[in-house]
Image (spheres, helix red, strand yellow):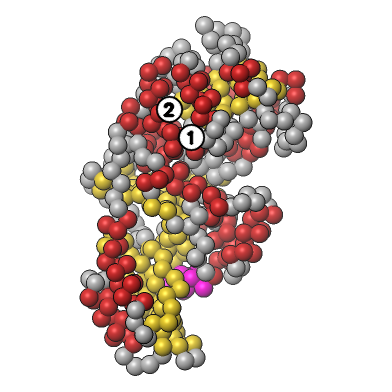
Amino acid sequence: MRGSQDCINIGLLGCGTIGSGVYHLIQKNYSELTEAAGKPLKVKRILVKDPYEPRPFEVDREIMVTDPGQVISDESIDIFVEVMGGIQPALSLALDIISSGRHLVTANKEIIANHGRELMAKAAQTGSHVRFEAAVGGGIPLIRPLEESLGGDNILKVMGIVNGTTNYILSKMSSEGSAYDQALAEAQRLGFAESDPTADVEGFDAASKLAILCSILFKRGGTPREIYREGILSVRPEDLENARELGFVVKLLAIAVRENDLISARVHPTMIPDSHPLASVNGNFNAIFVVGESVGELMFYGQGAGSLPTATAVLGDVVNVARNLGRPPISTRTYWLRDASIKPIGDTVTRFYMVLRVIDKPGVLARIAGVFGDNNVSLESVVQKGIGDSAQIILITHEVIESNFMKAKNGLEKLDVVLEIPSVIRVESGSESKSQNA
């Protein structure tokens, strides 16, 4: 029987930034992990592409192999830790592990977000423990509290900064007035951004994480493809300055709201009041703001990435599985098999910030207001700044159906007095609590 020996054997799939961090912490925190898990943890095999590749932490090359079969076929391994990233071969290996009834801890948001339904269905059949705390929020204890501690509440909304790269870039642009290219280059120099930052700056990473959160919080499986996604490439330093003057900050937010049988799920740059808890989350930190029907407002905050923070979350999952070897999982997550009904972005109700560059002459504001009125868009605030022969109009709408706003935007673009609409950013309100508890 696995787990009956004097130690708990770990098969480590991948040994890059996170994997070497996992190995390092197992050696460094041996006593603490032994006490927490009930037995010593031992890394038995490590799957790598190249045993001689430089790594952040020293790792025993004697236990490294390049053939996946040498790890997967080892019957003495109790828990497999997958930190390879990407879809393949990680997904195939994960399915092999789960199909055999063995246990998987993964930090791989891509396989959970895109193939969670397949993985959870297989785990429900075989009784395999599947844990993925590090897939969202890095080192922040998040998945287990959401899944277990808040399992008895109805979650109404989640709104989070789940990508440290974009948060660092926007923080840099806001605090120093840096252009996007400058802030990105600095993030890459510091190791916060990849050489190809597409997944981060265009919102793909955040959409994957939001899909996982939706599946857990709303008990219905969804995928990143169903989530509206917009990156930060169009955000200008001027927008961040305007936001400051209006009492807002701009963050790339992952937002999901329960609306009866529908889920509104979207990733995009968002203006939030500077008094909101998420507004003070800067640099490469992550934070997830949750609103429960009974519990009210909660926020989880911390390092969203990095070798040791993420490795800590991975090992938390390993300890959890180790304590429960021989027992069925707490939840088989059969809810992941239910279809999520995602609300079309055009039906979403929100507020908007818009900047228009217009010809500076009498009657312009009246024509603009007429277009908004014709499309059932009302304005909360309007600020006009003169710039030579043209003027800049900065406005914020009241809550409006997105499709109505976009019709108004199209109408404005056709006006001969409107030279350009350089910016449109959605705006979220302050307090989110809808708790009805006394």
CB atoms of marks 2 and 1 within 8 Å: yes
Residue drawn at (30%, 62%), measured in percent from left and top? 402
> What percent of the width, then of the height, locates residue 78?
55, 16
Q: Is the magenta stretch mostly helix, strand or loop?
A: helix
- Which of marks 1 and 2 precedes in the sequence? 1
Residue 43 in view = no
Q: Residues within 10 Å of mark 1 (few under 14, many from 20)?
A: many
> What percent of the width, then of the height, locates residue 2?
53, 10
The disc at residue 111 is 1
Give the residue pinned by disc 2: 119
300, 228: nearer the viewer:
228
Looking at the rendering, the stretch of residues picked out in magenta corresponds to 238-246
Residue drawn at (50%, 66%), measured in percent from left and top? 235
Amino acid type of disc 1? Answer: Ile
66, 237: nearer the viewer:
66
Q: How far apart are marks 2 and 1 (CA)?
A: 9 Å
In the figure, is residue 75 to the left or right of 124?
Answer: right
322 is higher (above) or lower (below) than 389:
above
202, 263: nearer the viewer:
202
